[in-house]
Image (cartoon, grey):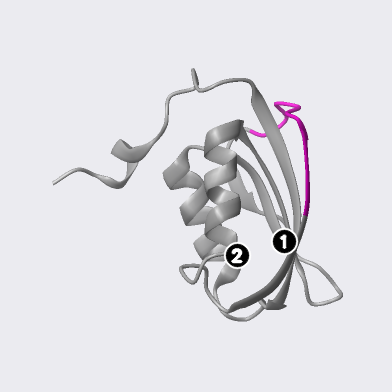
Amino acid sequence: MADKHSAQFSTDLGEPVRLDARVSGVVQAVGFRYWTVRKAEELGLTGTVRNNDDGTVGIVAEGPQPVVLELRRWLRSPEAPGRVEEVQESVSAATGEFGGFQVSY
């Protein structure tokens, strides 16, 4: 049986990109941040996730474009916890500022 880190993607999948996303719906107090960190770590991404004062969740994720797009797909899927109603996002060049993926307060 493979461990959870065996699914990490190699970094030769293209230029790293940065996803800035704002997720709205029922996404606070449902474990959304915890599961987002877990999914991002499974994918080998770096960045942060945080609850915003307006009830949305903010996500910044960096990594190879195909992997970042997989996180984006997951955010919009029934696999994500809670009930995602909308994902507002932008993609730009990665900054490389993160050492891992964590909850930001």
Q: Secondary structure at mark 2?
A: helix
Which residue shows up at 58% across the image and 70% down it? 32
Could you say where residue 43 lies in the image, as x and y percent from the top left? 46, 42
Above or below: residue 77 compared with residue 38: below
Identified by mark 1, the residue type is Arg
Spatial separation of the CA atoms under disc 1 and disc 2: 7 Å
Q: Which residue was labeled with disc 1?
A: 50
Which residue shows up at 62% across the image and 81% down it? 29
Could you say where residue 97 lies in the image, as x and y percent from the top left? 73, 30
Horizontal side of 11 relative to 89 (left or right) equals left
Q: Secondary structure at mark 1?
A: strand
Residue 19 in view, yes or no: yes
Could you say where residue 6 lies in the image, as x and y percent from the top left? 29, 37
Residue 64 in view, yes or no: no
Where is the C terminus found, in terms of image quarters?
bottom right
Q: Which sits earlier in the primary sequence, circle 1 or circle 2?
A: 2
Above or below: residue 27 compared with residue 77: below
Q: Is residue 95 magenta?
A: yes
Classed neighbour count for the residue bearing mark 2: other residues with Cα under 10 Å, few (<14), some (14–19), many (≥20): many
The answer to which of 100 and 81 lies nearer the viewer is: 81
Specify start and end residues of the magenta stretch as a single range. 89-98
Horizontal side of 99 relative to 24 (left or right) equals left
The answer to which of 8 and 99 lies nearer the viewer is: 8
Q: Which residue was labeled with disc 2?
A: 33
Identified by mark 2, the residue type is Arg
